[in-house]
Amino acid sequence: MKFKVEASGLRDKLSSFLATAKGSKRFVTGLMLLFVIAGLAVFEPVINAVRLGGRKPVEIGLFERGLPPSLEHPLGTDMLGRDVLALVLVGLRYSLMVGMMAGGIATIIGMVLGISSSYLGGRIDVVLNSITNGILILPTLPLLMAIVAYVRMDMLLVSLTLAVFTWPWSARTIRAQVLSLKERPYIMLAKVTNLSDLEIVFKELLVGLIPYIVASFSFSVIGTIMAETALRMIGLGPAEIPTLGFLLGWAMTYGALAQGFYTLVLAPAVLLVLIFVALNLVNTGLDEVFNPRLKKITGL
Amino acid sequence: MKSLLQVKDLKVYYKSIWGDFKSVDGVTFEVYENEVFGIAGESGCGKSSLVDGILRLVAPPGYIAGGEVIFEGVDLLKIPEKELRRIRWTKLAYIPQGAMNSLNPVIRIEEQIIDAILDHKQMSKRKSRQLALSALKSVGLPVEVMQMYPHELSGGMKQRVIIAMAIALKPRLVVADEPTTALDVVIQRGILQLLRRLKEDYGMTVIMVSHDMAAHAQVADRIAIMYAGKIVEIGFVYDVFEDPLHPYTKGLISAIPSIGRKYVKGIPGLPPSPLNWPAGCRFHPRCTYATDVCRSVEPPMREVSPGHFVSCHLYGEKA
Amino acid sequence: MVSYAIVLFISFTVVFFSLRLIPGDPVMRFVDLMTRRYSYEMAPEIYKNVIEEYKKMFGLDKDIFTQYLCFLRELAKLNLGPSFLNFPAPAQVLILRALPWSIGLLGIATVIAWIIGVVAGTLLAWFRGSKLDHFLFTVAICMSQVPYYLMALFLVMLFAYIIPLFPPRGAYSPTLVPELSISFIWSVLRHGTLPALSLILISAFGWMVSTRSVAITIVGEDYLRFATAKGLKKRRIHNRYVFRNALLPQVTGLAMSLGFIMNGFYLVEWIFSYPGVGTLLSLALGLLDYNTIQGVILLSMFAVLTANLLIDLLYPLIDPRCLYEV
């Protein structure tokens, strides 16, 4: 696939980005961690098929109950005789799927609203901004929980609902950036030429927004996974979609801790933390890479 | 005249990914007691960095790359921080550029004046208040200012507050960085008169850094002209203005607008970059008298007439 | 003030309508849930009657706009309608019973975390570049991203089960009666430690990170430079110049983050079965207790908005620049 790139546009930015990106330890670590996690999730069906001999990991009674961690069952088995490692991998896969879908939708909504709000300015901006801030300040989780409790949902609907509650984060970031870019000379120049607003947005604005869009996406993914996990732990949400949160909730409800099934609780929790850490590292790293004010230039 | 401050070969550089910005690149001069010493030059020639260097206020990415600053026999650059803190304000005060931002926005003026007093001298709160009040009076500010917050004052008033703070402990040397920039002409006059009074009524020594030649003309006793990180001319104000030796000084003075003159002549070209000073005499790319030797050899500082020094090949072996 | 009232009103209305517009009839859902759970069979006519009766009691038989008006009217009287959990006890009774526990735990934990974080953050910025700063900062970045409830899980596992130092659930020992005695207070403290820690450990680090950034910006400001030039004592500079100025944005930040903290906190309560509003919500959700759920949602929003208002009103006390606008 050949990209026709304009003079000092994408290609230069990409190469300078890669150069600085390599220098940021955080970014690189985060990215590697992400790859590992994503790899696990993508290859989960294969891994589980191999380990379990083609049986589904959620099948009850596949193995003996309550086995401690061993070579064959690195995380032991739970009280229904399921291999914990297999369960956790399935959970990881679904968690990431929901997170990325919901995060993606949230980012898109946030982008559209954020760009229109700041670009068009005026009353639209005031209204949209108030709504954004309102949602950000208020504790929306109970409302989200109520909605999920009463409505039977499939994965798409869940993602949509999660997105509806998460978009303000990306909207705010992107709006702030557009506001600062709007006053830059090259935008004003573009406005003077006869480009339509939409063209300006796509051609000039978006390039400068890319790092913020990426950052917004990771924030949104974190936010949606967190919200989804919170929902699950209380027992809400579709049971056919076994995310890590679902696993945790199920474990808590069935007294895993009291019975000593620590790995069942520990593994999903640790994986969730790893996902958050990885995404955050990528975010901080992105910040380091794109924000010239930071340490790099001063050499300190 | 006794010498109060000797600056020897001071260098202040700034680190960057493209190399070092050599803002102050070997500056040497002497300031005598009870005089107003002006330092003039364009924006970007290193004046403010020079002040930072003298007062040891250089912050990263800047650093002091060499030189000595001898004040009352002590090298300010080498003494330990505790000693420096004790000298600061009691003997050596600073009036920064942009008084607007130099005041703590959440603390009343009264406290801001007093905290400097109390941190240096042992005295009762009441005495320090009186001291603060008298300082305010001597700069012409009313008592009410004490209870106000910085944002309630105008620019000129803030500048005066800073000056009041500076003189409260009757220091020997006051360094004022662009004291009149960003103020309107009427206020400027007041501030300049105030600075002059510091020398005449209080016997202080004042170093005034400014790009405003007219201000120097009104207030300074001696003046140093700075260009491209180095001093190019030093002398008594009268001498330098009447008979400017360095081509750059000539350019600066002819650029001062005055009611009688019809044309104002500027200096052609742009100031060079501190990353890459020109070789030889740093002014040679803009100098109408430049010769080959100017392009390759840096001219030393020579005394052309009593008290009048210049660094220029035009006044070579002749002196 | 006015905007506060407007936002409050709008959010209540939004909540009301979004809950009402959810497809399905809450009464029917509840009755169905009950019959399923307790294997109770009902003849169809009785079923219809039961539903009708309940509906009347809950005011759900009228059209939506009348419902809305009734809702507002009852809300003014602080009456949320009967709950399902403890029928026929009205929802507000349940909520009020749980409220003190929540406010106590959440309030104290948030304040402690904030204070620790802001003080530590300023100190870190002061000693910027030192090994301590580097180490704590990295730790803080990692720790602050962990969700509260996950930390709660770790803590419960570690200190309540594996090493039984703290009790894993409840607000006080079930053998005790609420009274002002030392043993009771001690029990409350013991039971509250782990939940509070789940919040504090993460929140404090979060505040540390943000305060440090703010303080570093302040250290670069002109008035800090001037303060150094004045030769002020270091402690004075730190306290009156850096810290005082760093406080300002952090106070506003506190107000804005309350909603977020509350979100995570409800789950923490549930994990510890702490008898607060969060656990109440979880139970209500499990039972589809309409009025209680609604009550908790409304209460949470009200609490956050009020806290924001309070902080807005008190802000001029610490930032003299704002005095004019009040």
Image (cartoon, helix red, strand yellow):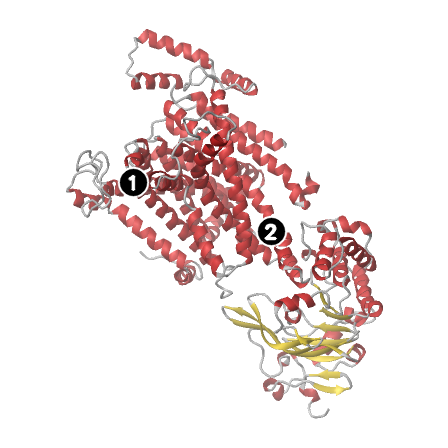
- The dot on residue A144 is none
Residue indicated by mark 1: A262
Q: Secondary structure at mark 1?
A: helix
Image quarter of residue B196: bottom right
- In the image, what residue type sits under mark 1? Tyr
Q: Find residue A289 and report its horizontal and vertical position in percent.
A: 45, 58
Nearer-the-camera pick, C52 or B10: B10
Q: Find residue C162 and report its horizontal and vertical position in percent.
A: 32, 41
Which residue of the protein is positioned furthest toward the bottom in this rendering? Answer: B317
Residue indicated by mark 2: C243
Nearer-the-camera pick, A42 or A7: A42
Residue C312 vertical placement versus C78 (above, below): below
Kindly indicate whether the residues beneath marks 2 and 1 are on one polypeptide chain: no
Count of numbered circles in the view: 2
Residue beneath the point at 72% across and 52% down:
B111
- In the image, what residue type sits under mark 2? Phe
As drawn, is C248 to the left or to the right of A238? right
Chain letter for mark 2? C
